Image (cartoon, rainbow, N blue to C red):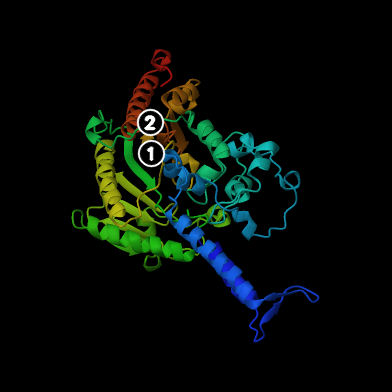
């Protein structure tokens, strides 16, 4: 319709206003009577009006839409954002020039990363500015030891890192946890009544226990990449959520800036290591760091210490069942409170709960029991026993005390992981007793869990 209006306007503009009885048309002496020109113009205007009426009566043609396209277009567009790397002007060489030296790197990152894999990640960047070199920095700072435990050697700067660099992270997660990532959603079981035992460990060997779980908060970068402002907003959110928890479990929030070194040691808080400072976890320490302590000391909640949130329950009587129950109840309540604050815990469809470290994906749950062992640590079958039980045994400052913990957090439910540790501690205790009596333990070596 607009084209006809513009056409008639142009005709009116080009018609000169003249006083004579003739209107010159074109060069030379060719002329046309003004009355004749007016008649032609009138006929043209009538034709334009007819066209306008005809166009208005024509039905509007709507474009063909497909339901699935309309439904999934926003999702697909979000998956292909404008290249964030265009915002940066990093003076870097080609991937082969920037590829790190991994000859003596004993982390899973060092074992898995190749030049081709590095080249595919090289120009990728999350919306918050995390590049692949940020991801692999921990493994370059601490390359590990050939004889020591194999660390993941990488860290996620934000939740998007697990998606953007998925072909790298998935391989690290599968290697570390010895579980395949499938299209199925990881199962979760926080029903502590499903745990068998845990309150019946032999106190002659089991000294104490600790159950902890970590969570990341949606819409915030992880500790290695978050800003001061983000960290302070996380503290504000934690204060609001914990105030709701205090209605059912009395406690108080303590800022690290208000605690002495002695008070921090009583709460099992340690000063940041040089490694944490180098990779950025402990930036601006102790700004916006805090710990919430229940009055009965059954629960601690670390805020911005090593992850967004870490819930810790310690028991001096080595009652794993009680510690696990405390964690399950408190975690579910905090999850509800954070969801009410519109910042739920970060969950990924194929990975489960995720935080900055790939070593904690899935459940984020760690169960550790401190036990006394004298004969078993030097036994030839120990390595096979630990591998088949899927548990770790780490040395402590005391030569007779060892820390037993779950090897993986992915591929099992929370109850199943706790059950592995409880059953493992019981079996190790039985083996230690047999070795004390100079008896064989060959028949007690379990099959692969």
Q: Is residue 124 left or right of residue 304?
A: right
Looking at the image, residue 430 lies above or below residue 270: above
Say few, some or many: other residues with alpha carbon within 10 Å of mark 2 (under 14 / 14 to 19 / 20 or more).
Answer: some
For the point 75% across and 73% down, the residue is: 26
Looking at the image, residue 15 lies above or below residue 271: below
Q: Pick the quarter of the image with the C terminus.
A: top left
For the point 29% across and 46% down, the residue is: 331
**For residue 425, which quarter of the picture?**
top left
Question: Under tag 1, what secondary structure?
Answer: loop
Question: Under tag 2, what secondary structure?
Answer: loop
Please tell me the numbered disc located at residue 29.
none
Q: Nearer the viewer, residue 292 or 308?
A: 308
Query: How far separated are the C-alphas under marks 2 and 1?
Result: 8 Å
Q: Is residue 448 left or right of residue 187?
A: right
**For residue 117, which quarter of the picture?**
top right
For the point 57% across and 56% down, the residue is: 129
Q: Is residue 236 left or right of residue 393?
A: left
Q: Are marks 2 and 1 in contact (CB under 8 Å)?
A: yes
Looking at the image, residue 128 lies above or below residue 67: below
Whether residue 151 is visible: no
Q: Which residue is mark 2?
A: 412
Q: Which residue is mark 1?
A: 363
């Amino acid at each position: 319709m607009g084209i006809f209006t513009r056409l008639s306007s142009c005709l009116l503009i080009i018609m000169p206003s003249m006083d004579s009885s003739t209107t010159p048309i074109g060069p030379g002496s060719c002329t046309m009577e003004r009355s004749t020109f007016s008649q032609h113009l009138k006929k043209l205007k009538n034709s334009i009006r007819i066209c306008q009426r005809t166009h208005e009566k024509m039905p509007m043609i709507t474009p063909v839409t497909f339901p699935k396209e309309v439904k999934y277009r926003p999702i697909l567009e979000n998956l292909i954002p404008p290249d964030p790397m265009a915002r940066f002007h990093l003076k870097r060489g080609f991937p082969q020039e920037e590829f790190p030296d991994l000859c003596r790197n004993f982390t899973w990152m060092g074992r898995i990363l190749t030049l081709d894999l590095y080249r595919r990640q090289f120009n990728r960047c999350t919306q918050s500015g995390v590049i692949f070199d940020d991801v692999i920095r921990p493994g370059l700072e601490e390359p590990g030891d050939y004889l020591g435990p194999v660390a993941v050697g990488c860290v996620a700067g934000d939740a998007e890192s697990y998606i953007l660099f998925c072909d790298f992270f998935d391989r690290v997660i599968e290697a570390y946890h010895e579980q395949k990532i499938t299209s199925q959603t990881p199962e979760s079981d926080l029903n502590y009544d499903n745990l068998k035992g845990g309150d019946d460990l032999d106190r002659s060997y089991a000294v104490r226990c600790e159950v902890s779980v970590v969570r990341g908060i949606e819409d915030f970068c992880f500790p290695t990449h978050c800003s001061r402002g983000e960290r302070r907003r996380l503290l504000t959110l934690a204060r609001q959520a914990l105030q709701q928890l205090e209605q059912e479990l009395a406690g108080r929030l303590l800022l690290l800036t208000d605690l002495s070194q002695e008070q921090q040691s009583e709460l099992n808080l340690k000063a940041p290591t040089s490694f944490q400072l180098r990779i950025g976890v402990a930036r601006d320490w102790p700004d916006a760091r805090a710990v919430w302590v229940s009055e009965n000391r059954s629960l601690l909640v670390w805020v911005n210490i090593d992850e967004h949130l870490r819930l810790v329950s310690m028991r001096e009587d080595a009652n794993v069942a009680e510690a696990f129950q405390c964690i399950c109840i408190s975690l579910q309540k905090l999850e509800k409170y954070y969801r009410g604050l519109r910042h739920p815990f970060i969950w990924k469809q194929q990975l489960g709960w995720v935080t900055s470290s790939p070593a904690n994906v899935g459940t984020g749950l760690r169960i550790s029991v401190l036990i006394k062992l004298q004969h078993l640590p030097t036994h030839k079958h120990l390595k096979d026993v630990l591998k088949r039980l899927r548990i770790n045994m780490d040395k402590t400052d005391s030569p007779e005390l060892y820390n037993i913990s779950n090897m993986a957090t992915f591929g099992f439910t929370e109850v199943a992981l706790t059950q592995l540790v409880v059953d493992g501690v019981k079996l190790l205790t039985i083996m230690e007793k047999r070795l004390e009596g100079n008896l064989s333990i060959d028949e007690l070596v379990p099959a692969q869990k």
